């Protein structure tokens, strides 16, 4: 006969199997509404498989993915925003706490208007962006120089 600890271990493994392809998160200063939020994340994240969305009363949400590739793409992609408010996302783990953490940094998009065209190279734009913080991404229109009103 198994010990109580064995039952606890089985339950933990069962939870890992169920929630191992899930993320938890929140949108800073925004309380998502289920139906529009589900449609938004499916569109924004370009989900290929099915997902289940679970909303918590405190603004947190969980998303369970059918495809681990979708989950990985969401976690590695971004920064994700809704109404110009960043998402805070992390992979689910058994002791995850659904409470907002003290943020020490937040990814933001920055526009640099009317830059001279001769500095529209990755190295120069990177140095300019470094004055604000650590550059993470450059949008496609800037990379391809299809819009030159701002970088």
Image (tube, rainbow, N blue to C red):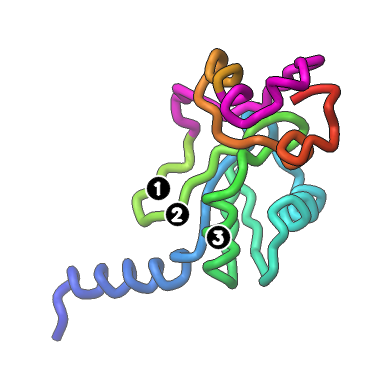
Can the viewer see residue 142? yes
* x 78%, y 50%: residue: 40
- Secondary structure at numbered mark 3: helix
Q: Nearer the viewer, residue 142 or 96?
A: 142
Report helix, strand or loop for mark 1. loop
Q: Quadrant of residue 82?
A: top right
Q: Is the C terminus in the top left, top right, bottom left or bottom right quadrant?
A: top right
How far is the residue under mark 3 from the one under mark 1? 17 Å
Q: Is residue 98 above or below residue 48?
A: above
Q: What percent of the width, then of the height, locates residue 77?
A: 59, 48
**Which is more N-terminal, label 1 or label 3?**
3
Q: Residue furthest bottom?
A: 1
| Residue identified by numbered label 2 | 92
Determine crowd level at label 3: few under 14, some 14-19, many 20+ residues with C-alpha closer than 10 A.
many
Q: Quadrant of residue 140?
A: top right
> In the rendering, at what x and y percent does residue 105 appear?
49, 24
Q: Position of residue 69 (x, y in %)?
A: 55, 66
Q: Tell me the chief SS of the magenta region.
A: loop
Sequence-wise, the earlier of marks 2 and 3 is: 3
The residue indicated by pointer 3 is 71
Mark linked to residue 84: none
Secondary structure of the residue carrying numbered label 2:
loop
* Callout 2 touching callout 1 (CB < 8 Å): yes
The residue indicated by pointer 1 is 96
Marks 2/1: CA–CA distance: 6 Å
Viewed as shown, does residue 93 lie left or right of 38? left
Range drawn in magenta: 100-126
Image position, residue 52 (x, y; %): 65, 64
Q: Is residue 107 magenta?
A: yes
Q: Looking at the figure, which quarter contains the N terminus?
A: bottom left
| Front residue (pair 62, 132) | 132
């Amino acid at each position: 006969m198994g010990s109580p600890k064995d039952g606890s271990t089985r339950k933990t493994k069962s939870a890992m199997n169920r929630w191992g392809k899930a993320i938890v998160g929140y949108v800073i200063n925004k309380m998502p509404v289920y139906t529009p939020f589900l449609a938004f994340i499916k569109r924004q994240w370009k989900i290929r498989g099915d997902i289940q969305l679970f909303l918590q009363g405190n603004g947190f949400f969980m998303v369970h993915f059918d495809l681990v590739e979708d989950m990985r793409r969401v976690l590695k992609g971004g920064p994700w925003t809704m109404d110009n408010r960043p998402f805070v996302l992390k992979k689910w783990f058994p002791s995850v706490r659904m409470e907002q953490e003290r943020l020490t940094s937040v990814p933001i998009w920055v526009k640099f208007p009317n830059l001279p065209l001769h500095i529209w190279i990755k190295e120069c734009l990177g140095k300019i962006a470094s004055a604000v913080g650590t550059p993470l991404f450059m949008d496609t229109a800037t990379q391809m120089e299809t819009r030159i009103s701002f970088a």
